């Protein structure tokens, strides 16, 4: 299996200098480190976060490479080159069962105008893979922060000759898989495209959905994105126009009333909302005048 560089040096992040460099403190001394990731990484690159640096590789001027960052008690890889290497080695060693049937693994292969991380082949066919690190976790759900991606645009152009209609007319599950293979697109963004652009009935689960239903006391058994979506797909008819309007109403309600600090008095859902009743009742008691 691929190992991390050794030895690793603990440091405290000061700030990001530019797209590929950070400033950190090691034993009270400021040092620069190469950042092998062009993503925004706003959730990770917070001043004061613990980071792990390795002595530089190659002729760069920076004395260190940044390898890991600690965020909310988790160590997160910030090396964009690591995931394909880890996955390729796992496949070769038989530690990735879904890909066990493939006989060869190639790195960095050309497909049209795109360059993809892995190509797996066997006598009946081939499989292209894009492997990425997850750099954002919310409520134990791994997410890919949204970001514009020129590479993603080239990828879709190569596969569909820049015909948006041909891209969106794919069977729903194939379209969703292709969207999720693009760096910068997570499940929520993919389902936004499926519902609003392609007209497929996939309910978009966002922060407003979770907040409103949690306050209503309606939650799935698990906490993943898929758990939430399964709950809603099981409770509502699978109709795109219904999902479209339902989600839009949730967003409007979440922005206007069911905010992070909610305005429970006068809420249209107050009669069925335990959290709202508790909050509104507490305010009435605080505002009451003793006899």
Image (cartoon, rainbow, N blue to C red):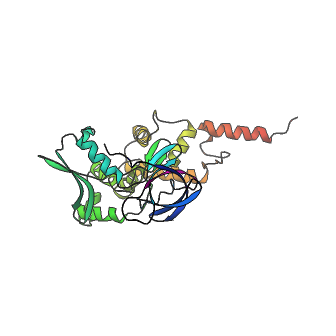
From where the camera sits, is residue 280 visible?
A: yes
| Relative depth, front residue between 23 and 107 | 23
Please name the residue shown 24% across and 64% down the image: 158
* Residue at x-position 66% and y-position 38%: 277
Q: Position of residue 256 (x, y in %)?
A: 60, 54
Which of 201/68 is in front?
Answer: 68
Query: Residue 3 occupies which quadrant of the picture?
Result: top left
* Residue found farthest to the right: 291
Q: Give the main secondary structure, helix, strand or loop, of the magenta stretch.
A: loop
Range of residues picked out in magenta: 46-61
Outermost residue to the top: 221
Q: Residue at x 37, y 58 (%)?
A: 57
Verify whether residue 57 appears in magenta. Answer: yes
What residue is rendered at 45% in x and 35% in y?
222
Rendered location of residue 217, percent (x, y): 55, 35
Counting from the top left corner in percent of width and height, residue 10 is at: 51, 49
């Amino acid at each position: 299996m691929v190992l991390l560089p050794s030895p690793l040096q603990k440091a405290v992040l000061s700030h990001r200098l530019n797209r590929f460099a950070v400033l950190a403190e090691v034993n009270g001394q400021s040092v620069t480190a190469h950042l092998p990731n062009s993503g925004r990484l706003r959730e990770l690159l917070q001043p004061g976060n613990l980071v792990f640096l390795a002595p530089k590789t190659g002729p760069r001027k920076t004395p260190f490479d940044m390898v890991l960052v600690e965020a909310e008690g988790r160590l997160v890889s910030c090396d964009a080159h690591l995931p394909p290497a880890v996955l390729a080695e796992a496949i070769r060693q038989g530690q990735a069962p879904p890909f066990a049937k493939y006989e060869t693994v190639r790195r960095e292969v050309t497909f049209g105008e795109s360059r993809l991380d892995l190509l797996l082949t066997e006598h009946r066919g081939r499989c292209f893979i894009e492997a990425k690190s997850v750099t954002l976790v919310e409520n134990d759900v791994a997410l890919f922060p949204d970001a514009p991606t020129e590479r993603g645009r080239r990828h879709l152009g190569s596969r569909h000759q820049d015909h948006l209609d041909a891209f969106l007319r794919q069977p729903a599950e194939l379209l969703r898989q292709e969207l999720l293979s693009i760096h910068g697109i997570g499940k929520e963004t993919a389902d936004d495209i499926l519902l609003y652009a392609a007209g497929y009935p996939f309910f978009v689960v966002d922060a407003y959905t979770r907040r409103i239903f949690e306050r209503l006391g309606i939650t799935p058994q698990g906490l993943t994105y898929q758990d939430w979506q399964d709950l809603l797909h099981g409770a509502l008819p699978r109709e795109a126009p219904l999902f479209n309007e339902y989600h839009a109403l949730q967003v409007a309600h979440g922005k206007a009333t069911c905010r992070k600090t909610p305005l429970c008095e006068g809420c249209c859902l107050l009669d069925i909302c335990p959290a709202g009743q508790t909050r509104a009742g507490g305010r009435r008691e605080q505002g009451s005048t003793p006899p």
